[in-house]
Image: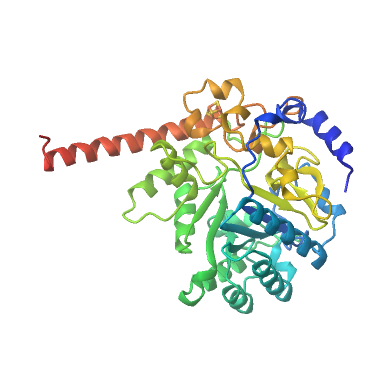
């Protein structure tokens, strides 16, 4: 692990804001409610857009392949101490990688037992995992059900679309294996272990075909994720299209909005909640403070992985679970910046009419070398028209319902 001074210097060079330009007195210190444990650093797939292996940060090469029991226990101990100190009644622990199922059944079971034993009575510990789904077989699903671990599976829509990006190192597509895993998770006896599916938006695919494939897996929830990109590495856009990502999302949103029983799509739930004056639960929209911290397989305390798409070392805090508690991470400028809402936004965002809904977009998507994270999202044009579209749709619906109500229940 790099020393703290080296970590700080690297940040100041690559991201003057927040690392050299944020007044830390403004930090609100919202406690972490989710711990991401990087239990296995390698993956059995080689997806071409992966932010862990294919983007700027290559720190996975230097870390232990598997998290040791010593690091596991230190990380759980730090999180339990944090929960006690802040009186948390509910926490979430997410197993992540690489591919967390490579950690193996025995280790996963021991981790689940250790996690539940570490926390005080009265603190509900929810266990989850984000997997590529290839290793989801019957014995694994039985273990997940037994230990109350809910898995989210990454799947990018239809077979041909999925297999273009989510392939093994020797070029074979993974859709067939993932679909087998999802079929198992969808069975009534296994649904307790099924958290949902996560799909990365690909604007060269048919959005409705993608949506229909995702709902065919009957997931409890769907995450649609904009590909990680920033001003130095902008997202791919088809020639002549200004807002292809918004257009892709509209197509699904309009279909979803008309469904008699729409599936849970977190991005859309957040967009509608924000339009109605509520707050977002995800990180792609809104101004809710982030409450997630990561522990790497060597014990380093880090920020969320999506920042790996910005610059090498962007997630580093210079802290680790053997020497530092999690409150120390709450004072890291990068983490403070993700908890202070409007105070972390650029002038352009602050004067934008969509700011209350968009919130500047995902923090990682604001990055530009030389200025750092004080910028609008690289998806700004898409986000602006997407939230406007949702706003119009919901407002029209409310007007219609209000006039129907007036007809049925006349005023006075
Ligand atoms: S739409 Fe663009 S300018 Fe407006 S808040 Fe979002 S990122 Fe900022």
Q: Answer with the quadrant where ligand 1 appears in the image.
A: top right
Q: Is residue 246 left or right of residue 34?
A: left
Q: Is residue 337 above or below residue 281?
A: above
Q: Identify which residue, 199 or 80, lies in the foreground.
A: 80
Asked where in the image residue 96 lies, by quadrant, the reply is bottom right
- The percent position of residue 335, horizontal first and vertical second, equals 69, 39
Point 38% across, 54% down: residue: 262
Point 56% across, 25% down: residue: 349
Q: Is residue 129 above or below residue 243?
A: below
- The percent position of residue 80, horizontal first and vertical second, equals 68, 59
Q: Identify which residue, 250 or 150, lies in the foreground.
A: 150
Point 64% across, 59% down: residue: 94
- The percent position of residue 87, horizontal first and vertical second, equals 60, 53
Q: Is residue 245 left or right of residue 15?
A: left
- The percent position of residue 257, horizontal first and vertical second, equals 36, 47
Point 44% across, 38% down: residue: 274
Q: Is residue 154 above or below residue 283?
A: below
Asked where in the image residue 71 lies, by quadrant, the reply is bottom right
Q: Quadrant of the C terminus?
A: top left
The colour scheme used here is: rainbow
Residue 241 visible at all: no
Residue 304 visible at all: yes
Q: How many marks?
A: 0
């Amino acid at each position: 692990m790099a020393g703290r001074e080296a970590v700080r210097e690297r940040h100041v060079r690559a991201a003057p804001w927040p690392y050299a330009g944020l007044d830390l007195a403004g930090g609100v210190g919202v406690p972490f409610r989710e711990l991401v444990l990087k239990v296995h650093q390698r993956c059995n797939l080689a997806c071409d857009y992966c932010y862990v292996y294919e983007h700027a940060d290559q720190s996975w090469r230097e870390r232990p392949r598997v998290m040791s029991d010593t690091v596991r226990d230190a990380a759980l101990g730090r999180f339990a101490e944090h929960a006690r100190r802040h009186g948390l009644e509910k926490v979430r622990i997410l197993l992540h990688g690489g591919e967390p199922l490579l950690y193996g059944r025995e280790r996963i079971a021991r981790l689940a037992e250790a996690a539940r034993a570490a926390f005080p009575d009265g603190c509900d510990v929810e266990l989850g995992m984000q997997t590529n789904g290839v290793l989801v077989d019957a014995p694994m699903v039985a273990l997940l059900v037994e230990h109350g671990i809910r898995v989210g599976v990454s799947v990018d829509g239809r077979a041909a679309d999925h297999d273009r990006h989510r392939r093994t190192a020797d070029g074979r597509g993974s859709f067939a294996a993932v679909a087998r895993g999802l079929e198992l998770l969808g069975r009534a006896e296994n649904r307790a272990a099924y958290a949902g599916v996560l799909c990365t938006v690909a604007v060269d695919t048919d959005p409705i075909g993608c949506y229909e494939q995702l709902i065919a897996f009957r997931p409890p929830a769907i995450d649609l994720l904009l590909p990680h990109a920033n001003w130095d590495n902008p997202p791919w856009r088809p020639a002549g299209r200004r807002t292809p990502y918004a257009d892709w999302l509209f197509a699904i949103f309009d279909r979803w909005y008309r469904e008699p029983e729409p599936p849970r799509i977190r991005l859309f739930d957040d967009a509608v909640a924000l339009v109605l004056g509520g707050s977002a639960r995800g990180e792609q929209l809104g101004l809710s403070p982030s409450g997630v911290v990561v522990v790497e397989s060597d014990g380093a305390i880090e920020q969320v992985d999506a920042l790996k798409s910005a610059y090498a070392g962007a997630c580093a805090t210079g802290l680790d679970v053997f020497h530092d508690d999690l409150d120390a991470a709450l004072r890291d400028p990068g983490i403070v910046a993700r908890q202070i809402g409007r105070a972390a936004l650029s002038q352009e965002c602050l004067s934008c009419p969509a700011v209350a809904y968009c919130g500047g977009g995902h923090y990682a998507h604001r990055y530009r070398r030389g200025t750092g994270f004080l910028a609008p999202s690289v998806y700004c044009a898409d986000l602006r028209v997407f939230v406007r579209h949702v706003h119009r749709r919901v407002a029209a619906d409310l007007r219609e319902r209000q006039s129907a109500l007036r007809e049925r229940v006349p005023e006075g």
